[in-house]
């Protein structure tokens, strides 16, 4: 299969248009809320070079978060405006807020050899997969639903019972869709899980579809 080509985004008169360019090496990592995905990504970044796609969101920044670092924090009106212009490859409505991955955040990384991490949910994964079938996808599982519940309560000790039940219900739905992903990582031991993520990406870098330039340099 030839390397997948997409379009480099540029902006003109408030609209979004495209020019053809190579897409970067993209890996989607999804998990139920509280499964420890963010911790694993931080651990992975310590042992191999990564780039991180910064999503747009309508939620308010949490303590210590900075605009353009954790997220691009925008108003609902701005988010809707960008969405109507076709700026997002995927959007999701999660816990009363909108999140979106922009084409620009992906295609601006097309010259990098590093992995571009997309931290998105199952619906976002499905949207991206339609446009970019050669991406690598990994789903992170918690050891059990009881452990997941404990992690949610540890992170949000003031969460009410209704929201906790809703999050666990959503988690069950997301876990049932894990079969759609390329790889599964069970996050029971953080160091082991980080090693497994690193192993997956090191192997993926050796796939033929990512080494076309090397092959051509030797045979042409």
Image (cartoon, rainbow, N blue to C red):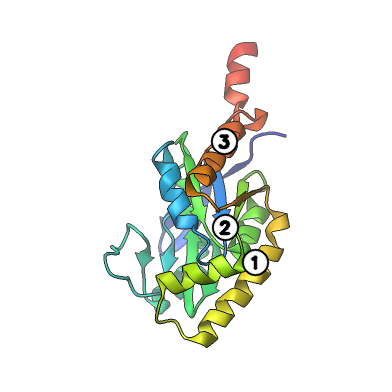
Does 50 appear above or below 92? above
Expressed as whole percent of the image width and height from the top left, the position of residue 103 reads 50, 55
Characterize the local packing of mark 1: few (<14), some (14-19) or many (20 or more) Cα atoms within 10 angstroms. many
Expressed as whole percent of the image width and height from the top left, the position of residue 69 reads 32, 57
Question: In the rendered structure, which disc, 2 or 3, sits on the residue that comes first in sequence?
Answer: 2
Question: In the rendered structure, which disc, 1 or 2, sits on the residue that comes first in sequence?
Answer: 2
Q: Is residue 184 left or right of residue 43?
A: right
Residue 93 visible in the picture: yes
What label does residue 199 carry, if any?
3
Expressed as whole percent of the image width and height from the top left, the position of residue 197 reads 55, 42
Residues under numbered marks 2 and 3 in contact, where contact means CB atoms less than 8 Å apart: no
Please state which of residues 60 and 8 is positioned toward the viewer in this rendering. 60
Residues under numbered marks 1 and 2 in contact, where contact means CB atoms less than 8 Å apart: yes
Characterize the local packing of mark 3: few (<14), some (14-19) or many (20 or more) Cα atoms within 10 angstroms. few
Expressed as whole percent of the image width and height from the top left, the position of residue 101 reads 49, 60
Q: Quadrant for the N terminus, please.
A: top right
Q: Residue at x 62, y 18 (%)?
A: 216
Please state which of residues 180 and 135 is positioned toward the viewer in this rendering. 180
What label does residue 97 carry, if any?
none
* Residue where numbered disc 1 is placed: 174
Q: Residue at x 60, y 32 (%)?
A: 203
How far apart are labels 3 and 1 at the CA level?
24 Å
Q: Is residue 184 left or right of residue 107?
A: right
Q: Quadrant for the C terminus, please.
A: top right
Kindly indicate the quadrant of the structure image that contains residue 215.
top right
Residue 220 visible in the picture: no
How far apart are labels 1 and 2 at the CA level?
9 Å
Does 50 appear above or below 156? above
* Residue where numbered disc 2 is placed: 30
Report helix, strand or loop for mark 1: helix
């Amino acid at each position: 299969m030839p390397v997948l080509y997409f379009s480099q985004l540029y902006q003109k008169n408030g609209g979004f248009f495209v020019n053809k360019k190579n897409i970067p090496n993209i890996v989607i990592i999804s998990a139920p809320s509280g499964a420890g995905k963010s911790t694993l990504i931080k651990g992975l970044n310590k042992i191999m070079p990564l780039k991180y796609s910064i999503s747009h969101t309508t939620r308010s920044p949490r303590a210590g978060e900075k605009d353009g670092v954790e997220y691009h924090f925008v108003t609902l009106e701005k988010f809707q405006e960008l969405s109507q212009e076709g700026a997002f490859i995927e959007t999701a409505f999660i816990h009363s807020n909108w999140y979106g991955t922009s084409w620009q955040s992906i295609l601006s990384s097309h010259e990098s050899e590093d992995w571009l991490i997309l931290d998105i949910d199952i619906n976002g994964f499905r949207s991206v997969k339609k446009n970019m079938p050669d991406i690598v996808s990994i789903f992170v599982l918690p050891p059990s639903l009881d452990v997941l519940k404990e992690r949610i309560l540890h992170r949000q000790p003031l969460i009410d019972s209704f929201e906790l039940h809703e999050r666990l219900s959503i988690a069950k739905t997301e876990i049932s869709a894990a079969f759609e992903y390329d790889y599964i990582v069970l996050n029971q031991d953080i160091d082991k899980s980080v090693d497994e993520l690193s192993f997956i990406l090191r192997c993926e870098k050796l796939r033929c579809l990512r080494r076309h330039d090397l092959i051509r340099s030797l045979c042409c």
